[in-house]
Amino acid sequence: MRWLFFALAGLMSLPAAAPQALAAEDYAVLIISRERLEVPTYCEIGLYIQDQLAGRLFQEQATSFNLPPGDTSLRLKLLPGQAPGCQPGMLAPAAQNITLKAGDVRKLRIALGPDGMYLKAAALEY
């Protein structure tokens, strides 16, 4: 009977002994979508956040990121691939800057304009 008491007390104390994982509560969610067929290319598009490759998108895909609040630089660029004609250009495309607040959930979609690809605000639709 005693061993049952000590075993039960030991099991109950395990959660208290385990280190607590503390997640940062102040972040924003950024969703990037290529779900529409606005960009008439089958090439892979690279998404650069703060000039670092953060994601790759094919047609009809979306990806999301948890980002800290503040100013964020976003850039889109065609990535070299297996398909012919999917070679990146020589010039770096222009960056778009957005400001995120803690708790924001933003969705942007890839669109094509006269100056190339850019990110456009989209409805969350969920």
Image: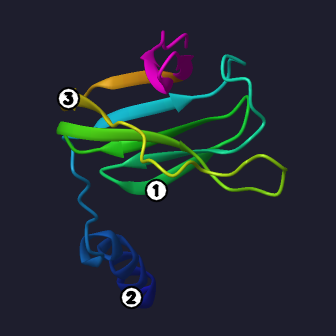
Q: Where, quadrant-wise, is the C terminus in this rendering? A: top right
**Of the numbered discs in the image, which one, if any, rests on residue 2?**
2
Where is residue 10 drawn, in percent x and y?
35, 82
Mark 1 vs mark 2: in front: 1
Say what secondary structure mark 1 lies in.
Answer: strand
Q: Which badge, 2 or 3, is on the more N-terminal residue?
A: 2
Whether 117 is drawn above or below 5: the answer is: above
Q: Nearer the viewer, residue 8 or 61?
A: 61
Placement of the N terminus among the 4 image quadrants:
bottom left
Q: Which residue is mark 3?
A: 99
Q: Which mark is residue 53?
A: 1
Task: Tell me which residue sits at (36%, 34%) in the image.
Answer: 29
Instruction: Using residue 10 as the reference point, say whether residue 24 is left or right of it.
Output: left
Q: Amino acid at mark 3?
A: Thr
Mark sitting earlier along the chain (1/3)? 1
Tell me which numbered mark, 1 or 2, is placed earlier along the sequence: 2
Q: Residue furthest front?
A: 90
**Image side of residue 39 versus residue 119, left or right:** right
For the point 30% across and 50% down, which residue is it?
50
Q: Which-is-in-front pick, marks 2 and 3? A: 3
Q: Nearer the viewer, mark 1 or mark 3?
A: 1
Q: Amino acid at mark 1?
A: Leu
The foreground one among 6 and 92 is 92
Which residue is nearer to you in this view: 46 or 90? 90
Q: CA distance from mark 1 to mark 2?
A: 59 Å
Q: Which mark is residue 17?
A: none
Labels 2 and 3 touching (C-beta < 8 A):
no
Q: Is residue 101 above or below residue 92?
A: above
For label 2, the crowd category at 10 Å Cα-Cα, with few meaning under 14, some 14 to 19 and many 20 or more, is: few
First to last magenta residue range = 110-126
